[in-house]
């Protein structure tokens, strides 16, 4: 199992997830992010924003890909933003969203660490 570090080189606050229990704050933070991604529409929205040309998208760019209304798309984007998964920037009357890759890298690292640890202790 490798030590986890953030992009800036500092230790990931969740790296010890398999060595010791998470603090209540860390557990709540991770759970909020995973909860935001647990909705299929939000997971797909996150994927569309992250993979959109230029790395950002507004509701007008992606709402045609869903069978829900534009206000519903806006609500889901707000949930993702509030969970720290998306950043936003207002330009005139439009809000452009971009994926916060550092947050996804942290989640990926935590889940990878848990999976690696589980693989090493799983019975053969």
Image (cartoon, rainbow, N blue to C red):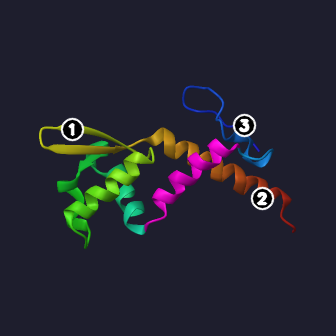
Residue with the mark numbered 3 = 3
Contact between marks 1 and 2 (CB within 8 A): the answer is: no
- Residue farthest to the right? 123
The answer to which of 60 and 35 lies nearer the viewer is 35
Q: Specify the segment rendered in magenta.
A: 23-39
Question: How far apart are labels 3 and 1 at the CA level?
Answer: 37 Å
In the displayed structure image, the side of residue 76 where residue 4 appears, left or right: right
Residue 90's disc number: 1
Circle 1 or circle 2, nearest the eye: 1
Work out whether residue 57 can be spotted.
yes
**Which circle's residue, 3 or 2, is located before the other in the chain?**
3
In the image, residue 119 lies in the stretch drawn in magenta: no
- In the displayed structure, 111 sits above or below 38; it is above
Contact between marks 3 and 1 (CB within 8 A): the answer is: no
Point 50% across, 42% down: residue: 103
Point 60% across, 49% down: residue: 28
Question: How far apart are labels 1 and 2 at the CA level?
Answer: 43 Å
């Amino acid at each position: 199992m490798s030590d986890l570090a953030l992009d800036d080189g500092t230790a990931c606050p969740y790296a010890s997830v398999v060595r010791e229990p998470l603090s209540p704050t860390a557990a709540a933070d991770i759970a909020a992010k995973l909860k935001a991604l647990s909705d299929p529409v939000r997971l797909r929205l996150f994927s569309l924003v992250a993979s959109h040309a230029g790395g950002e998208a507004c509701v007008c760019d992606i709402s045609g890909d869903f069978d829900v209304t534009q206000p519903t798309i806006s609500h889901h984007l707000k949930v993702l933003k509030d969970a720290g998964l998306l950043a936003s920037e207002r330009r005139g009357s439009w809000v452009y969203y971009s994926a916060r890759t550092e947050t996804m890298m942290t989640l990926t690292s935590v889940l990878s660490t848990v999976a690696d640890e589980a693989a090493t202790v799983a019975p053969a």
